[in-house]
């Protein structure tokens, strides 16, 4: 498995993977040796990202929110109105 080093490329790839196979895609987070590790897979493709930077936690939170909204078939505007 290869780690994607640039956050924007990782986020785009994760969202595309989910949109292509929403029922098979799994999203796993772990904390290893002082690093946050994110892994998204559909059993054929695995996308990984790791960081030890505190500033990346906000990006991680935004990705979580984006993925949760996609899983609920909602948009940011719909979520804000409730």
Image: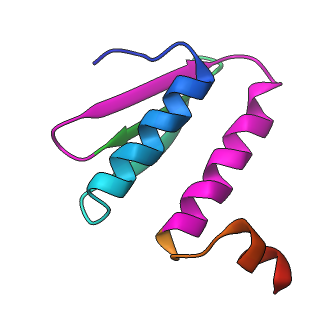
Residue 36 shows in this picture: no
Looking at the image, residue 42 sits to the left or right of residue 35; the answer is left
Q: Nearer the viewer, residue 81 or 55?
A: 81
Residue 50 to residue 12: above or below: above
Q: Quadrant of the C terminus?
A: bottom right
Residue 2, magenta (yes or no): no
Q: Residue at x 81, y 24 (%)?
A: 54
Looking at the image, residue 43 sits to the left or right of residue 2; the answer is left
Q: Residue at x 67, y 58 (%)?
A: 65
Q: Position of residue 79 (x, y in %)?
A: 74, 76
Q: Position of residue 13 (x, y in %)?
A: 43, 35
- On the image, which quarter does residue 34 sit in? top right
The part of the chain drawn in magenta is 42-70
Residue 70 to residue 3: above or below: below
Q: Nearer the viewer, residue 75 or 31?
A: 75
Residue 22 to residue 74: above or below: above
Q: Nearer the viewer, residue 12 or 4?
A: 12
Q: Residue at x 84, y 83 (%)?
A: 81
Q: Residue at x 63, y 46 (%)?
A: 63
- On the image, which quarter does residue 23 sit in? bottom left
Furthest residue in direction bottom, as rendered:
82
- On the image, which quarter does residue 69 sit in? bottom right
Q: Nearer the viewer, residue 13 or 43?
A: 13
């Amino acid at each position: 498995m290869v780690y994607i080093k640039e956050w924007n490329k990782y986020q785009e790839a994760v969202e595309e993977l989910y949109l292509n196979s929403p029922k098979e895609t799994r999203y796993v987070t772990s904390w290893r040796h002082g690093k946050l590790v994110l892994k998204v897979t559909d059993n054929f493709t695995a996308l990984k990202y790791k960081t030890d930077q505190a500033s990346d936690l906000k990006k991680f939170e935004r990705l979580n929110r984006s993925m949760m909204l996609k899983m609920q078939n909602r948009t940011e505007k719909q979520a804000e109105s409730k």
